[in-house]
Image (cartoon, rainbow, N blue to C red):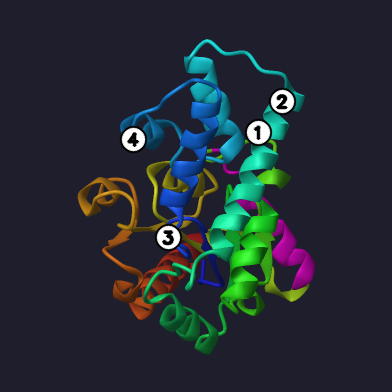
Amino acid sequence: MNLKTVLFDFNGVIVNDESIHQALIEEILLGENLRTSAQEYREVCLGRNNRTCLSEILSRRGRVVSEDYLNQLLANKAVAFKQQLEQLEKLPIYPGLADLISQLQATGLVMGVVSGALREEVELILNHAELAQFFSAIVAGDELPASKPAPEGYLLAVERLNQKYPDLQLQPSNCLVIEDTLTGIEAAKRAEMQVVGVANTYPFHMLQRQAHWTVDHLGELELERVEQVFSEASSSARVSEC
């Protein structure tokens, strides 16, 4: 159970863009003569992909829309999101991310991204922030049949990393996940992975009740301590097998 891989959520962990997504969802709803509250957005959308978010809100309003129409709404949002990013002078990458990536590189740990966002959006931001080179696998929301808290995204990341690095022999128990939402933490735990909750979106005390580790920001993550816990668990497992 040695630590081999760190899998990052994207929105709320790598990039602080939730306010942009919320504003664009609200804009779509206004175009449908509907409104949503900030509380409802947090309940329905945080940690979930856009399709699940929008479908749930429309359903709550009694709206039944065709798949084609929903796809068009989401395509319009994707275009608007890209336009919003192009207007920013600086991408809102979370502080401490670069230092953490350097630490992970120094220890030889493989990194990946598992997100509910569209692959196009993930790659756009990672490329513009010059971070793409550090992530050996990306699993995006438009590649998955279900949104988090379903564990499939994290399990698919393991599969892809094993395809890329056959000698890695990666198992879910070798993975550390970094998440910012309760939904994401649940997805990681259902994939039987250890998870760090970073209090970028929810209060520390709420994440602390769900995650294996909790930090206020990425710079607080004590990588050596985490690796020690993984190593001790691996040693205990070997003793049990004897």
- Give how far apart the Cα atoms at labels 3 and 2 are: 29 Å
Residue at 49 percent of width and 49 percent of height: 188
User: x, y (%) of residue 8?
Assistant: 51, 62
- Any magenta on residue 69? no
The residue to which callout 3 is attached is 16
**How many numbered callouts?**
4
The residue to which callout 1 is attached is 73
Is residue 210 left or right of 62 when viewed as pictured? left
Magenta residues span 150-165
- Any magenta on residue 155? yes
The residue to which callout 4 is attached is 38
- The three-letter amino acid code for the residue at tag 1 is Leu
The tag earlier along the polypeptide, 3 or 2, is 3
Closer-to-camera residue (49/147): 49
Q: Residues within 10 Å of mark 1 (few under 14, many from 20)?
A: some
Q: Residues within 10 Å of mark 2 (few under 14, many from 20)?
A: few
The tag earlier along the polypeptide, 3 or 4, is 3
Instruction: Examine the residues drawn in magenta and state their main secondary structure.
Output: helix
On residue 159, which mark appears?
none
Mark yes or no: residue 231 visible: yes
The residue to which callout 2 is attached is 69
User: x, y (%) of residue 160?
Assistant: 73, 61
Q: The residue tagged with tag 3: helix, strand or loop? A: loop
Closer-to-camera residue (33/130): 33
Question: In the rendered image of this protein, does residue 236 appear above or below residue 116?
Answer: below
Q: The residue tagged with tag 4: helix, strand or loop? A: helix
The tag earlier along the polypeptide, 2 or 4, is 4
Tell me where residue 49 sits by quadrant: top right
Asked if the residue at tag 2 contacts the one at tag 1, i.e. Cβ–Cβ closer than 8 Å, the answer is yes
User: x, y (%) of residue 202?
Assistant: 30, 49
Asked if the residue at tag 2 contacts the one at tag 3, i.e. Cβ–Cβ closer than 8 Å, the answer is no
- Give how far apart the Cα atoms at labels 1 and 3 are: 23 Å
